[in-house]
Every structure is written in C-alpha cells, then in structure tokens.
C-alpha cells in the first residue's frame, strides 16, 4: 500500500487532493512571492480526522502544515515541499455561543467577522479585527496572534482566546486553558497562541466576547507631512486618552483607497490619522472635546468628525481596503510588518521615506499607529529583473530600522518564512536555542510547520523571482 493509498483510508475522494491541478491553489498563501508544492492536501471535517492526518505524518515522519484561508502575509501557511497540507476550511462551525458567559466556541475554519455577526443579536462582539477579518479564520488568527485596528484598547488575539482543544505533533489531544478568565498552573495556552503552527493544530477555540460599545466618536485628521501624523499619535497617547483605534495612511495608501472604494478622503493629504473613541456616551462626549484640542494642536489642516454610522463605516471602509487596494498602483507589492515605540513613529516614517528614495521603490504606509505597528507596502514589478530582490532588501532595511529604534520585526503577521532570517537581529543564539528546545520537546522531528520561524534551511522556492508559472504558461495575465 502506498502512502497516499493509506491516507485515502481516512479521507474520501474530493477530500484528498494530490493531482497537480488540485495542488496549484495551495502552493502559496497571501505572500505570493513564495511557492512550494505539497505531496497532498487533506480536508478534514472533524477533530478525529485531524488526529488521523497528524498520526499518519508522525508515523511516516512526513512534515505538515495546517492552513485556513491562506491569508498569511509572512509565508506562514506556505506548504512544505513533499509534505502534507491540512486544510481546515471545512471545520467552520460555531459550536456554541453563550451570551451569559460571553463566550463563543468555534472550529478553526470559522471566519473572524462571523463571530461578531453571530454575537450581535446579544449586544456582543469579538474585538480583534484584522483587515482580513471578512475572510481570515480564527485558527489562523490564533496561530499568528493577529491584532487589528482596535488592538490598541482591547489587545491582540491572545487577550481574547480562553481555551483551545489541540492536536499535538504526535497526534495526542490536549485541552489548553478553560472557559474561566482565571488561569491555573503554567500558561500553556499563552505559549500556544502565536506559535505559528509549530506546536500543533487547534481544532476547537473558546473566545471571549465583549459588550458592543454604546457609542463611537470617529475623527479623520489630514496632515501635510507624514511625520506630523506620527507625532500626533504620540501626543494623543501622552494626553492620557485611550482610543479604541488609531490608524495612519500616507498619500499612496489614500490614492489607492480612493480608487478602490471612494471613501471621500482628502486626496491632497500627505497623511491621514483616524482616531476612534468608544464607550458609554457621557465618557465619549467628554473625551471627544479633549481629543479635538489635541488634534488641532498637532498641526492637522483639516479635521472631520463622522456624523452618522454611515460616515463612520465609510472612513473605516477605506482603511480596511487599503492593503488590497494598493494592487491598483502596482502589479506586485510586499506587505511588511514591524513595530516601533510610539514615541519614535515620526522618526521611523521619515527614515522609511528616505529608504524609499534610496532604493527607487514607492512605499505606501498603512499602520496601526496606536501601538506602533507599521505596515509599509513596498511596490515593485516582479517582471522587471532585480526588482523583487531590491524590494526584499528594502523590506529588510525597514525591519532592521524597527529593531534599532527599540521595536520588533513583527507585530501581528508573524515570522513565517519572510522574517526568519531576521530573528538574530532581535534574539541571541541562546534565546533561539531555548525556543527550539521548547519546540522539540513537543515535536522532536520538527514535523509541524517545518522550516518556519527559525533561521536557516530556506526552501529553493523562496528564491524564485519573476512571473508566476501560470503567467509563463499563458494561462493567466496581469495586463
């Protein structure tokens, strides 16, 4: 019996994919510059089937990666050459919603935004809101500890996951955390959230729900310099206010968002700052007056306040669409992810502008300004020889800048394949070896998402540049 025939005992035709045409959609995630082809793809529909797939991998020492919607921007859900890809999109059920306890229990393929939709009739919602929330899965959010625009006030995914049922790399099932807000014993769940699939696969996830805010106050401020917008963020935080969200977009991001969704942004602005207060009406009303003073002192030449729910949603629609909208400005782009202290935002943005000019590549800046999480989008044309390599060098310079300013090489997109070469910029070899020991304690053969996060052992697919194979074959075109 061949390996695939053995796997076919657990997965019927249609849920075991191995033909070349069936594998093509899984060769890459949202970081499309990286590609690899798995041996096969399985599509489990239950916890028990995930266990069977993982045990098959452990038995034959075959590496594997779990994947949801494939929206990872760091190559974190890139397949492993010759390995197994375990697709979790069919495990997409809401298992339980308890409005009294304010919890939701979901399978890993459940979509982020659907949690809030399900909780809305009870006046509740799920706070982490990555820009990909209409399509990204809770399992992927957990793996990368995703954030979003409102993580400034409410924290990252790790602050909203109470428990998880997990299949370890040897096929054993464990339950981490609980439905209680109080932990007992070691924080194994905290270790698991954000581990990028290196420690196992979550098949059930218990989420904390919050009451929907009574009211919002959303401000859009326009600036004639990107550095001024960055300094305005520091001024808002220094004032003692804690907004629900603070976001910045530069002129390129504004141009892209306007072309895509016509959000009504001031087109001539060099930078836009979005600040949103939320909470009980008397509190928001008092804070709004204070915020207005801070914003006007920061040098904004135009300030708008959303007068209705429709105006608020229009402001956020432009921001949420920015990543994908940049595709209107360039055939290819790298979405980078780094963090700097809020007090260094202005300096970081000024330096990114200098690096952009030096490398001759445009950079659109969109980021969660409240916690210093930068998302520079580096525009390039993959069909021009050398441009991808130049874009990657610029991306590396930005990551080094973040570390030099006291920040981090990632805020929410994870390390994956894209940033693992930069781990030594932040961590000593002793630090990295301590992380490896933890990983090997659970996965001695490094089967679970092998090749991710830790430096070294890069796949040849990472060095492939130029047109996608389907372009070269004349099947697709970006003209």
Image: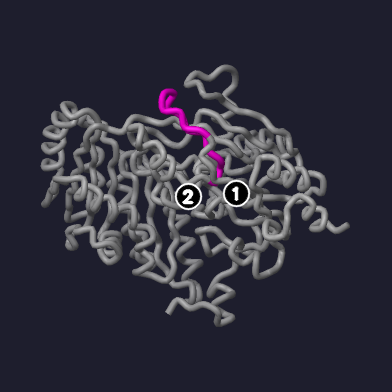
Residue 432 locus on image (x, y percent)? 62, 39
Q: Does the image show residue 426? A: no
N-terminal of the pair, mark 1 or mark 2, is 1
Residue lying farthest to the right in this orientation: 1
Magenta run includes residue 122:
no
Magenta run includes residue 101:
yes
Q: Is residue 276 left or right of residue 447?
A: left
Please determine whether, in this image, residue 357 is positioned above or below residue 420: below
Please determine whether, in this image, residue 73 is positioned above or below residue 203: below
Residue 466 locus on image (x, y percent)? 53, 74
Q: Does the image show residue 42? A: yes
The residue nearer to you, when weighing 101 against 180, is: 101
Specify the segment rendered in magenta: 96-109
Q: Secondary structure at mark 2?
A: loop
Name the residue rendered at 76%, 47% in the picture: 57
- Mark 1 = which residue? 88
Name the residue rendered at 70%, 44% in the picture: 49
Q: Is residue 164 left or right of residue 265?
A: right
The residue nearer to you, when weighing 308 against 345, is: 308
| Mark 1, other Cα within 10 Å: few <14 / some 14–19 / many ≥20 | many
- Mark 2 = which residue? 136
| Mark 2, other Cα within 10 Å: few <14 / some 14–19 / many ≥20 | many
Q: Is residue 406 left or right of residue 74?
A: left
């Amino acid at each position: 019996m061949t390996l695939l025939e053995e796997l076919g005992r657990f997965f019927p035709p249609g849920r075991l994919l191995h033909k070349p045409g069936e594998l093509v959609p899984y060769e890459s995630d949202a970081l499309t510059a990286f590609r690899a082809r798995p041996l096969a793809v399985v599509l489990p529909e239950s916890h028990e089937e995930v266990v069977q797939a993982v045990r098959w991998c452990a038995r034959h020492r075959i590496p594997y990666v779990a994947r949801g919607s494939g929206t990872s921007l760091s190559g974190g859900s890139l397949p492993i050459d010759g390995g197994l890809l375990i697709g979790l999109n069919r495990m997409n059920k809401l298992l339980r919603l308890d409005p009294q306890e304010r919890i939701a229990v979901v399978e890993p393929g459940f979509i982020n935004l659907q949690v809030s939709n399900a909780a809305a009739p009870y006046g509740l919602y799920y706070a982490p809101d990555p820009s990909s929330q209409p399509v990204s899965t809770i399992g992927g959010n957990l793996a990368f500890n995703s954030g979003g625009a409102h993580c400034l006030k409410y924290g990252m995914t790790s602050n909203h996951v109470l428990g998880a049922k997990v299949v370890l790399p040897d096929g054993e099932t464990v339950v981490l955390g609980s439905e209680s807000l109080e932990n007992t014993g070691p924080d194994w769940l905290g270790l698991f959230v954000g581990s990028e699939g290196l420690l196992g696969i979550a098949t059930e996830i218990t989420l904390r729900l919050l009451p929907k805010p009574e009211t919002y106050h959303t401000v859009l401020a326009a600036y004639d310099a990107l550095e001024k917008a960055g300094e305005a963020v520091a001024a808002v935080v220094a004032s003692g206010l804690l907004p629900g969200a603070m976001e910045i977009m530069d002129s390129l991001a504004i141009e892209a968002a306007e072309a895509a969704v016509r959000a009504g942004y001031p087109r001539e602005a060099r930078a836009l700052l979005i600040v949103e207060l939320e909470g009980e009406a008397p509190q928001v009303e008092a804070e709004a007056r204070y915020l207005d003073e801070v914003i006007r002192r920061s040098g904004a030449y135009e300030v708008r306040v959303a007068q209705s729910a429709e105006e608020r949603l229009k402001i956020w629609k432009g921001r949420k669409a920015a990543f994908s909208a940049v595709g209107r400005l360039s055939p290819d782009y790298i979405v980078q992810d780094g963090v700097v202290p809020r007090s260094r935002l202005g300096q970081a943005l000024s330096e990114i502008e200098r690096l952009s000019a030096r490398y001759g590549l445009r950079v659109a800046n969109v980021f969660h300004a409240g916690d210093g999480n930068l998302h520079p989008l580096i525009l390039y044309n993959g069909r021009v020889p050398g441009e991808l390599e130049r874009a990657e060098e610029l991306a590396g310079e930005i990551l080094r800048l973040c570390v030099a300013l006291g920040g981090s090489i990632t805020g929410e997109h994870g390390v994956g394949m894209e940033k693992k070469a930069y781990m030594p910029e932040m961590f000593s070899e002793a630090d990295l070896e301590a992380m490896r020991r933890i990983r090997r304690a659970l996965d001695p053969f490094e089967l679970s998402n092998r090749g991710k996060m830790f430096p070294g052992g890069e796949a040849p697919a990472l060095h492939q540049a130029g047109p996608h194979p389907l372009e070269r074959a004349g099947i697709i075109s970006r003209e």
